[in-house]
Image (cartoon, rainbow, N blue to C red):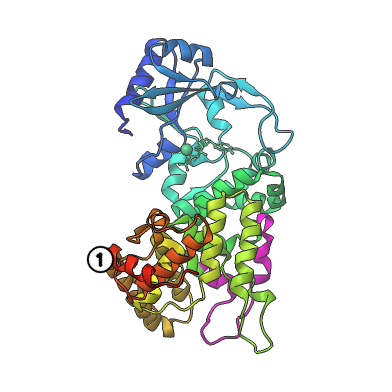
Amino acid sequence: MNIALPVAVTILLEKLAASGFEAYVVGGCVRDSLLGIEPKDWDICTCAKPQEIIDVFCDFHVLTTGIKHGTVGVVIDGKNYEITTYRSDGTYSDKRRPDSVNYVQDVKDDLSRRDFTINAMAYNEQSGLVDYFGGQRDLEQKIIRCVGDATVRFEEDALRILRALRFASQFGFSIETASKDALRRHKNSLNEISAERIREEFNKLLLGQNVEAVLTEYADVVSVFIPEIEASVGYDQHNPYHVYDVWQHTIKAIASAEKNILVRLALFLHDLQKPFCESENKGHFYIHAALGAKNAQAVLRRLRYDNNTVLIVSRLIFYHDTMLRPEKKLIKRWLNRLGEEELRMLLAVKRADAKAQNPQYLEERLQKLGAVERMLETIIDRQECYALKDLAVDGKDLLLLGFEEGKDIGKTLNYLLGMVIDEEIENKKEQLLAEIAKMDRR
Ligand code: ATP
Ligand code: MG
């Protein structure tokens, strides 16, 4: 079994070996290499202690911020490689982080603290693959299996519960029975995990190729940290446009969407308020988009998403059910309101939403969205003006005309922009200035 290591990694391993220290690449990069996926980063483990690593790489740029966890960063060609001393984690009194780091001499001890067999393999050119727990077999059989006793491993660190789901989603694997039973029994301890750690794994779960199967099978686990989904599970929509309940529809929509986290988060949250606002006229949910946007803000803030994510996702939800017509002026107004990137995301949300509804209406809906998209392309290709920044006059021009600083300038510019968008006037400076001259400015 050979893994093609990048040159920088070979240098790191060889330098450690030349100083008498055993060293391997380990974890995600070994797993990904065996899967034929290019690893994002190459982690290295070694028997050398942090100070020894620093000494070996005294001629290199070394980062020591992770040193109390036994990690030293070595920079080669601007890229940081993490080198971590073999350790067996100490006790976990808070189910989050080990209380102490215990350095060990044997790579097996380091591998045995890792979460799943597929993540517990090491490799170097001298020894080949080091696989004490059947990781390679589980990769071949597409199985997520805890290293050691699943119950103990989930008790030590509850984040592993969500990591099991995320790897299942990412790689299209299934979770082995004992691990699955144990994670179900311990699911509530996810409550003890920090929002930031949950968020990172949840993002990867949402972007996984197998997200549909995982969200279907493990809704009860996801609802530990997003209980807002509970009401939607099994909620019949009483509406001929829908063939799925709210939760099934949500899942199908996510799975049909492009792999953009903002789009997928928006789809995850877009309909969750439907069960709370069905009108007496059954099958109608008039305010679900506005309520959904508000609910999304609360969920995303709780999971400590950044402000930009909260803003964009809630706006996508707010508008997800609004009709977009392929009329140039209207699309320019949407571009003005959302910007190009976000309008494209809104189209992606609407397309995925349609794909998860009654297939009878799908073709028609996709055609309408396609027409909107073509209109958008035309506007962008022709570099038509839809935003103040592209208007041929700006605040300075108005100041020169004797406008006073303040509201009037903004109002006037927006008025002119409206005329340009509506094609009542061309976006040319002389014409815009002439229009201003015509205005009654008393
Ligand atoms: P990715 O490619 O998404 O980064 P990864 O497997 O590299 O996946 P990381 O979170 O970067 O995941 O962790 C690196 C390695 O550290 C894992 O492969 C695993 O061996 C180990 N590991 C990470 N988190 C845990 C955990 N909570 N418990 C036990 N081992 C873990
Ligand atoms: Mg990693």
- Amino acid identity at mark 1: Arg
The residue sitting at the bottom extreme is: 281
Image: 425 above or below 154: below
**Residue 208 location in percent, x, y?**
46, 55
Viewer-proximal residue, 90 or 208?
A: 208
Viewer-proximal residue, 438 or 38?
A: 438
* Quarter of the image with the N terminus in it: top left
Give residue 128's quadrant in the image. top left
Give residue 105's quadrant in the image. top right
Circle 1 SS class: loop
Residue 214 in the magenta stretch? The answer is: no
Image: 324 above or below 154: below
Q: Which residue sits at x=40%, y=76%?
A: 330
**Residue 273 location in percent, x, y?**
64, 71
Which residue does the numbered mark 1 point to in the structure image? 382
Is 229 placed left or right of 209 in the picture?
Answer: right
**Residue 368 location in percent, x, y?**
37, 80
Image: 170 above or below 42: below
**Residue 382 location in percent, x, y?**
25, 66
Cβ of mark 1 under 8 Å from ligand 1: the answer is no
Residue 245 in the magenta stretch? The answer is: yes
Q: Which residue sits at x=47%, y=35%?
A: 27
Q: Which residues are magenta?
A: 223-251
Is 277 placed left or right of 145 in the picture?
Answer: right
